[in-house]
């Protein structure tokens, strides 16, 4: 009998803990929904993209960090920005940091990213590859080994906005002294282009606000997820001593 009472009490205690967990998750969800109706997610992402990343000197190496599969939205954005910076700094070498399987470089994601940049008018002789690292820390350390005799040269990191802060800290931790960055920000279509032709101007203003609210809310929710992921990654890197 005592054993049954103990099990019942344990069960109700479990339900109580579960209820508290659901309440906490509910409050967090409501908070994130409310935050997505403001511009704060953008500014947090903007801070991660620009803190310690201002370009202070002409780079000797442009390092493009890999981003998922190719083609993909983040990968294509990084290729576009890398090509733009390569045209701006024609003397800089380009390092594509993206893992590839042994003996499978041709047709791999880093090879496709290299092809995407090269077809934008960038000489193929300027490219170098770091295809062994599987995360930001190992990629930075491997590039450090590649350029260990040229540590005072300037690096320019190309990566997504939320990933920039951790990337620069990782490269500096590995021993590089001059690390700058350019974040691959995306752009949104003008809300007025989404409106139906022929609407009266007053309706256009109202619909423009609705469209802005609808699209911005979902975009900012995605940005919040990326920010949360990056905060967790920064905490992990700090604990491991990678930054």
Image (cartoon, grey):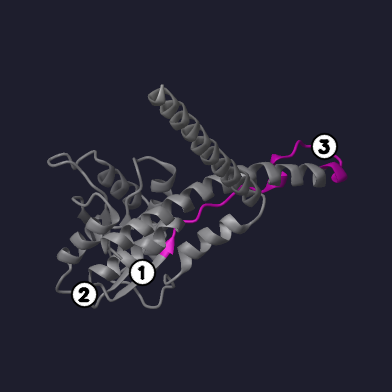
Q: Which residue is mark 2?
A: 151
The image position of residue 45, as x and y in percent, is: 51, 58
The image position of residue 160, as x and y in percent, is: 43, 55
Give 231 or 154, whichever is nearer the viewer.
231
Of helix, strand and loop, which one carries label 1? loop
| Residue interval drawn in magenta | 182-203
| Marker disc for residue 21 | none
Of helix, strand and loop, which one carries label 2? loop
Question: Relative to 41, is 170 above or below?
Answer: below
* Mark 2 vs 3, N-terminal side: 2
Give 92 or 74, whichever is nearer the viewer.
74
* Mark 2 vs 1, N-terminal side: 1
Of helix, strand and loop, which one carries label 3? loop
Residue at the front extreme, as displayed: 1
Q: Which residue is mark 1?
A: 89
Q: Which residue is mark 3?
A: 198
Taking the spot 29% from the left edge, 50% from the top edge, the residue there is 114
Classed neighbour count for the residue bearing mark 2: other residues with Cα under 10 Å, few (<14), some (14–19), many (≥20)? some
Instruction: Look at the image and tell me whether residue 1 can be seen.
Output: yes
Do tag 2 and tag 1 residues touch (Cβ < 8 Å)?
A: no
For residue 20, what is the image quadrant?
top right
Image quarter in which the C terminus is found? bottom left
Q: CA distance from mark 2 to mark 3?
A: 60 Å
For residue 138, what is the image quadrant?
bottom left
Do tag 3 and tag 1 residues touch (Cβ < 8 Å)?
A: no
Question: Relative to 152, is 117 above or below?
Answer: above
Task: Report if residue 198 lies within the magenta region.
Answer: yes
Asked whether, in this view, residue 142 is left or right of residue 79, the answer is: left
Q: CA distance from mark 3 to mark 1?
A: 46 Å
């Amino acid at each position: 009998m005592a054993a049954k009472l103990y099990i019942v009490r344990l069960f109700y205690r479990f339900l109580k803990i579960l209820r508290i967990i659901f309440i906490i998750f509910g409050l967090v969800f409501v908070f994130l929904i409310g935050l997505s109706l403001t511009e704060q997610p953008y500014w947090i992402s903007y801070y991660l993209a620009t803190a310690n990343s201002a370009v202070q000197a002409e780079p000797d190496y442009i390092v493009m960090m890999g981003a998922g599969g190719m083609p993909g939205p983040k990968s294509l954005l990084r290729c576009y920005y890398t090509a733009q910076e390569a045209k701006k700094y024609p003397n800089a070498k380009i390092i594509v940091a993206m893992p590839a399987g042994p003996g499978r470089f041709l047709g791999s994601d880093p090879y496709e990213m290299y092809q995407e940049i090269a077809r934008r008018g960038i000489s193929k002789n300027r490219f170098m590859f770091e295809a062994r690292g599987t995360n930001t820390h190992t990629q930075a350390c491997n590039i450090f080994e590649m350029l260990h005799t040229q540590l005072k040269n300037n690096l320019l990191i190309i990566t997504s906005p939320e990933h920039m802060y951790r990337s620069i800290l990782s490269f500096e931790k590995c021993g590089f002294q001059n690390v700058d960055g350019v974040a691959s920000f995306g752009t949104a279509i003008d809300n007025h282009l989404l409106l139906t032709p022929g609407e009266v101007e007053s309706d256009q203003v109202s619909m423009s606000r609705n469209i802005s609210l609808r699209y911005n809310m979902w975009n900012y929710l995605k940005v919040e997820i990326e920010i949360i992921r990056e905060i967790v990654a920064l905490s992990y890197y700090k604990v491991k001593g990678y930054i």
